[in-house]
Structure formats: structure tokens, C-alpha cells
């Protein structure tokens, strides 16, 4: 669907009437910005002007810098307006557009990022794309490309044709359905992947450091399946370092998007919903395995942050919080020594200053400190002759006082649009937190968010919308919206046994099959066949900071195939995995979710049916354990093939099954776990 172009407003440009908080940030620019719309494209064609397609998002620090330095400069804006048709795109609203021009940038330079600035022919074919430029360089680029466009169209066309051909290439080979998956292959996925881990500082080697939760989820599964302690160490050293580092908001909870250094101290301070949802799930899984109290603390604190700062009255969650406030990156979050001393009593202040590594000189910029710790709380308490429980209490109270004081500062802006895919990740985060902690509030919150998606984002005709803003759902969903929502509904079913959720999941999956598939149904397009036609229709299949929509969808087919004993679903999951199979060993970090699916197909996978009056209670008990190769169904009604003819008249029975073949029922969780442990090895 093409967005509406708005009438130019005096003193502000068209973006003043946009619903996107990111686009509205550029409403005061002297640049004659359009949103992506037919009017802009037609104007470029009629005036024979190239397009500038500038893409970013509200929490992006360097997007703000370029907006302030270049797009607010009258001279630069005048040149842009005279020689180009300028379009601003919110990548979170239109990831399909971002996907195309980001690939162009990577084809040209091997690099990507935001702000993304693409130059294109009036029909949208790019001939140049890059990221941030300071003003002088930006003006040079504008001059050079304008001159080239006017004087050497042959060169521009050659570049546009070549880049567009590259964007449209599908590098994956044809599936050989006779292929199989083996344990040796699965072991190779690990061996290549583990080489990337920084076992001293945690995370992946080098800097900047992104969290990449799905890669760590693979290591947790690998440890569970093989007992390889190196895999678990890769996770725990990372989770410990992140929890103690500046990337984690020590007094307010929640994680920043990434660390600029290698030891997690200095973040880019923006906080994204999608990062925090996945990290809640990751820490919950790690707690299930290790029972380390720190991990449960991080789960609780991060959920508290998300609910405090991102929860809308509608029941959905906002997208992000800016890195900047008062035109300074991180100003809201950093402290001077004197600021802390003014809030806390002298004795407490001395402890907190030491624990959080605060100095007069500052550990970041002059006099400014990013709160972080270098010691476990237990070790710090012991060194300071304080009982661990007492120090926990002192720290909790001090953090509350500091948070109250911090809340008096000018807050960073919040992008208050609601994105379906990322709200689905929040449902899954709540589910995983409930499994790990048995906190009933998390289950209730998952239900609330699912009801928001069903009531506000799912239309009667089966279309799932992506964006909710100002009480209006807009922008038909992309593949990630469908895939993550189906996954979330399956997750929630497994702790509620509400069959309505599976009915919704199947309904959404049918929409995907009807509108996103290709003839072979081996991978699915990112856009619907009813979406606006762009210069390319792309597949998203490599994982990144968020798992790829196709990898999530393959898991969905596998899980629903098990629950409904649907061979077509299971075959689709297998074909999808076969399509990317050759890519996994050499690019392990970017195919981690596919590797997890391979682990489910190669190693024993269990379907557990729990039926009877205590089904939900026993389900919660068994799911307090980390069971990555398990699907659970149950309740008081035999409403799935897995449950048929298994409801006992009085007791509660647990059936442990593999490929529709079940062991004799047992009555306790302990007995069921013994069967799983025996069969999985």
C-alpha cells in the first residue's frame, strides 16, 4: 500500500503530519521531504530528478546528528531541494524499503547502517548508497552525484542496472529433497560458531558488540543436547558481563542496543523493544539451566523497565527510547560523583560509588560515569564486610533513590508507535519469564498483549497489520509480523492450553501460505503479493540481531506440524531448512536459528501431552526446566490429535511421545523428566 502524501505546511515540511515519530523529527528541516509515496516518484519522473531516499529510525543517534548537521542547514537543503526529490523513510514502518536500499549499500561498499542514504533513478533503482556523512562530505557527494546524473547518464544507468540485478539475485541453491541432516553437521555448526566467541569479555569478538541473542540461544540448546560445557560457558560469560556492564541500565533495568567497546562499558544509549524482549527470554532460559539468581533478577528488572517506560494504555508496547536528550548522547543516563553524593547518605554513597566504579575524573567523558560493576555482588559484600542480603537491600534502596532523581531529568524521546512483530516477541518474553519464575503476573501480561494483537492488529479478512499509532492500525504486515505472532501464540498456548490461540496461529499461517509463498514453498517472500510493487521482492533468511522471518517461520511450521500431526507443515519446515543448509557452517552466527531447528530435527524431539484437572499446574512445573526440544499440549479437552483418547476420568496423566508414539502415561513431573532424560541421550 502506498502512503498518502501530505500538503506542504508553512514553516514545516510535509512530515509534520506524518504519524511516524521518526519522520516528525524531520518536520522542521528546510529539506522538502516527502514520505514514500506515489506523488514523490511521479514528481521525480516528470522533472527528471534523482531520488534521495534517506532511511533511519527514531532512536538512531547518527540519524539525529545528520539531521542536525546537514538536513537543518539552509544551504545544503536548498541544493537538495533544487536538484533532487527527497524522501524520508522510517525503517521500522517500511522495512521492505529499507531492505532493498540497505542491500544496495552493502553491494557498493560492503557496509551498512543508519542513517542510510540512497540515490536512485526516478523509478527507484539505486545507483549509489551509503550511511552517515558529515556536512562537508555530504555536500561533496550531492555535488558529484548531481553532476554525474546530469552529464554522464550512461554511467548512472549502468550502475543502477548492475546494483538492481545484484539486489534481485537469490544466492541460495535449489533444494535437493533427498538431503538429510546429521549429527556430524550439527557438530560442525557448533565448531565454527564457537570460534567467534570472546571467552574473556563475553559476546562475539571485536567491537562494536551487538548482543545477538539467537546465537546464544543456539549454544544453550547445544549444551542441552550434547553436554558440551564450552557451549554453556559461551553463554554465561556473556550474560554475566552484560549484566554488570554499562550496556545494562544498572538502576533502571533494560539493555541498550549495543556496546561501542569490547567490554560492554560504553553503549549507544538507545533502548529497543526488540533487544529487551529477546534478552528477557535468553536470561530466563539461562536461569532455567543454571538457577543463577542474577539471571532471574535481570528478567524481573528488564520486564519492569519495559512495562514502566514502553507500555501503552492500549496494551501494546512502544518501539524504542532515544539515545539522546538535550542534544547529548547518554546525558539522561550518566552520573558525576557529586550527583550521586547529593542523593545518597555519605556511607551509602561511598559503597555505591565503589560498586559502580564512579570516579571524580569519570569513566567515560570528563567527569561523567557510566554505572557498571566489575565484581559479583556477593564478592563485593564480602570484601566490604557486609552480609550479602544486607548489601542487596542497600543496593536496591540506593538504585530506587537514584532512579527517582534521574526521572527528574529531561527524558529522551520515546518512539510511541507499536510494531506487531516486536510486541509478539514481548509475548514470548513473558511466556519464557513465566516458565522460569512461575510468576503468574507474567502469564496474565502475555495474555493481555496477545489480546491487543488480536483485537487491534488482526482484521476480519485475515490481514495482520504492522503499525499501531494514535489508536489506528496501519501498514499491512510483513513476514516477520506474521511469523513472530504465530510463534508467540504457540508459546502462549503451551502455558495456557487455550486452543483459540492455535486456531489464530493456523489462520495467520494460511495467510502466509496464500500471499507470501513461492511455487516451491521452500522460502517465503518478505512482502505479500498484495503489497506495493518495489524494484525487488526479497527473502529474509539470515539471522541478525533479530532472527530472520523465514527462520522463525520454519520453526512455526515444525511446531504446528507436531501439534496437529500435519505432515505438510513438517515437510515445509524441512524444505526451508534444506534451502539454507549449505550456508549454516560458514556463517554460523547469522544462521543460528536455523541451526537450532536442525537440532530439533536431528536429536530426539518430544511431544508431551498433559491431561486432567491438574494439567496446567503440572505443565508449569515441567516447564520450569529448560526443554528446548519439547512441544507441550494439554488441558481438559481432547482438542488436538496429540490429545485424542488420552483424557483420564479422574487423575492427571503425562504422556511423553516421539513422532506420535507415546510411552505409558505417568502421573508426576519427575517421572516424565526421567523418561525425557533417558530418551534424549
Image (spheres, rainbow, N blue to C red):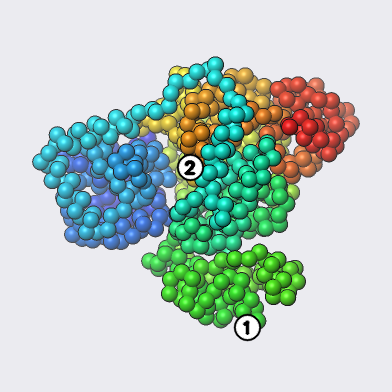
Q: Earlier in the sequence, mark 1 or mark 2?
A: 1
Identify the residue shown where x is 53% and y is 22%. 575
Q: Which residue is mark 1?
A: 346
Circle on res. 238: none
Q: Nearer the viewer, residue 473 or 610?
A: 610
Q: Secondary structure at mark 2?
A: loop
Q: Write the residue at 19% across / 53% down.
A: 140
Residue 345's x, y, as percent?
63, 82
Q: Let me know if residue 4 appears in the view.
A: no
Between residue 635 and residue 339, name the one nearer to us: 339
Q: Position of residue 436 (x, y in %)?
A: 71, 48
Residue in the foreground of this view, choosing between 158 and 190:
190
Q: Quadrant of residue 129?
A: top left
Q: Residues within 10 Å of mark 2 (few under 14, many from 20)?
A: some
Q: Is residue 349 above or below residue 540?
A: below
Specify the farthest residue to the left: 151
What is the x, y in percent for residue 531?
A: 39, 31
Tell me what residue is drawn at x 71 percent, y 57 percent: 293
Could you tell me which quadrant the C terminus lies in? Answer: top right
Instruction: List the residue tagged with mark 2.
Output: 544
Q: Residue furthest top?
A: 178
Residue at image location 51% in from the left, 41% down from the top: 589
What is the tally of numbered marks visible in this picture? 2
Q: CA distance from mark 1 to mark 2?
A: 46 Å
Secondary structure found at label 1: helix
Looking at the image, residue 503 sits to the left or right of residue 154; the answer is: right
Establish if 198 lies above or below 74: above
Amino acid at each position: 500500500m502506498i502512503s498518502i502524501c501530505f500538503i506542504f505546511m508553512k514553516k514545516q515540511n510535509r512530515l509534520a503530519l506524518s504519524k511516524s515519530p521518526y519522520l516528525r523529527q524531520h518536520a522542521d528541516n528546510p529539506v522538502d521531504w516527502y514520505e514514500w509515496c506515489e506523488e514523490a516518484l511521479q514528481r521525480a519522473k516528470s522533472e527528471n530528478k534523482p531520488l534521495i531516499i534517506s532511511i533511519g529510525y527514531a532512536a538512531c543517534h547518527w540519524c539525529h546528528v545528520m539531521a542536525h548537521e546537514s538536513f537543518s542547514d539552509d544551504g545544503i537543503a536548498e541544493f537538495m531541494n533544487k536538484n533532487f526529490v527527497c524522501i524520508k523513510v522510517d525503517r521500522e514502518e517500511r522495512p521492505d524499503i529499507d531492505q532493498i536500499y540497505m542491500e544496495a549499500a552493502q553491494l557498493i561498499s560492503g557496509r551498512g547502517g543508519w542513517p542510510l542514504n540512497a540515490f536512485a533513478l526516478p523509478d527507484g533503482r539505486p545507483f549509489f548508497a551509503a550511511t552517515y556523512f558529515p556536512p562537508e562530505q555530504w555536500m561533496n557527494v550531492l555535488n558529484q552525484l548531481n553532476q554525474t546524473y546530469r552529464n554522464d547518464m550512461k554511467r548512472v544507468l549502468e550502475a543502477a542496472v548492475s546494483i538492481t540485478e545484484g539486489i534481485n539475485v537469490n544466492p541460495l541453491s535449489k533444494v535437493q529433497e533427498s538431503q538429510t541432516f546429521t549429527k556430524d553437521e550439527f557438530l560442525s555448526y557448533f565448531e565454527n560458531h564457537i570460534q567467534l566467541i570472546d571467552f574473556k569479555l563475553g559476546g562475539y569478538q571485536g567491537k562494536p558488540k551487538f548482543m545477538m541473542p539467537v546465537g546464544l540461544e543456539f549454544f544453550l540448546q547445544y549444551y542441552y543436547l550434547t553436554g558440551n560445557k564450552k557451549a554453556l560457558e559461551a553463554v554465561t560469560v556473556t550474560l554475566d558481563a552484560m549484566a554488570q556492564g554499562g550496556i545494562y541500565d544498572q538502576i533502571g533495568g533494560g539493555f541498550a542496543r549495543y556496546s561501542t567497546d569490547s567490554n560492554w562499558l560504553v553503549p549507544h544509549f538507545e533502548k529497543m523493544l526488540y533487544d529487551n524482549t529477546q534478552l528477557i527470554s535468553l536470561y530466563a532460559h539461562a536461569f532455567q539451566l543454571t538457577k543463577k539468581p542474577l539471571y532471574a533478577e535481570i528478567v524481573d528488572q528488564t520486564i519492569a523497565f519495559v512495562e514502566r517506560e514502553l507500555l501503552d494504555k492500549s496494551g501494546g508496547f512502544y518501539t524504542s527510547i532515544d539515545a539522546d536528550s538535550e542534544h547529548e548522547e547518554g546525558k539522561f543516563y550518566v552520573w558525576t560523583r557529586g550527583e550521586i553524593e547529593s542523593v545518597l547518605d555519605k556511607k551509602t554513597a561511598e559503597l555505591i560509588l565503589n560498586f559502580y566504579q564512579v570516579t571524580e575524573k569519570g569513566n567515560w567523558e570528563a567527569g561523567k560515569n557510566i554505572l557498571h560493576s566489575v565484581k559479583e555482588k556477593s564478592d563485593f559484600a564480602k570484601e566490604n564486610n557486609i552480609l550479602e542480603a544486607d548489601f542487596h537491600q542497600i543496593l536496591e534502596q540506593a538504585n530506587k533513590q537514584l532512579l527517582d532523581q534521574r526521572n527528574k531529568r529531561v527524558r529522551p524521546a520515546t518512539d510511541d508507535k507499536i510494531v506487531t512483530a516486536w510486541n509478539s516477541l514481548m509475548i514470548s518474553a513473558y511466556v519464557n519469564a513465566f516458565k522460569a519464575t512461575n510468576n503468574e503476573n507474567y502469564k496474565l501480561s502475555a495474555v493481555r498483549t496477545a489480546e491487543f494483537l488480536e483485537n487491534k492488529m488482526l482484521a476480519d479478512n485475515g490481514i495482520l497489520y504492522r503499525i499501531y499509532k494514535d489508536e489506528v492500525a496501519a501498514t499491512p504486515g510483513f513476514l516477520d509480523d506474521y511469523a513472530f505472532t504465530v510463534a508467540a501464540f504457540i508459546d502462549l498456548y503451551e502455558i495456557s492450553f487455550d486452543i483459540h490461540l492455535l486456531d489464530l496461529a493456523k489462520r495467520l499461517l494460511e495467510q502466509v501460505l496464500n500471499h507470501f509463498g513461492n511455487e516451491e514453498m521452500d522460502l517465503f517472500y518478505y512482502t505479500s503479493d498484495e503489497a506495493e510493487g518495489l524494484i525487488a521482492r526479497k527473502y529474509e533468511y539470515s539471522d541478525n540481531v533479530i532472527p530472520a522471518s523465514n527462520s522463525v517461520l520454519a520453526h512455526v511450521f515444525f511446531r504446528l506440524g507436531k501439534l496437529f500431526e500435519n505432515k505438510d507443515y513438517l515437510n515445509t519446515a524441512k524444505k526451508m531448512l534444506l534451502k539454507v543448509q549449505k550456508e549454516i557452517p560458514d556463517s554460523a552466527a547469522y544462521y543460528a536459528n536455523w541451526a537450532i531447528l536442525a537440532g530439533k530435527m536431528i536429536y530426539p524431539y518430544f511431544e508431551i501431552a498433559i491431561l486432567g484437572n491438574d494439567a496446567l499446574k503440572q505443565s508449569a512445573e515441567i516447564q520450569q526446566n529448560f526443554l528446548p526440544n519439547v512441544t507441550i499440549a494439554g488441558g481438559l479437552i481432547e482438542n488436538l490429535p496429540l490429545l485424542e483418547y488420552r483424557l483420564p476420568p479422574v487423575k492427571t496423566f503425562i504422556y511423553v511421545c516421539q513422532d506420535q508414539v507415546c510411552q505409558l502415561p505417568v502421573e508426576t513431573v519427575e517421572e516424565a523428566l526421567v523418561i525425557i532424560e533417558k530418551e534424549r541421550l
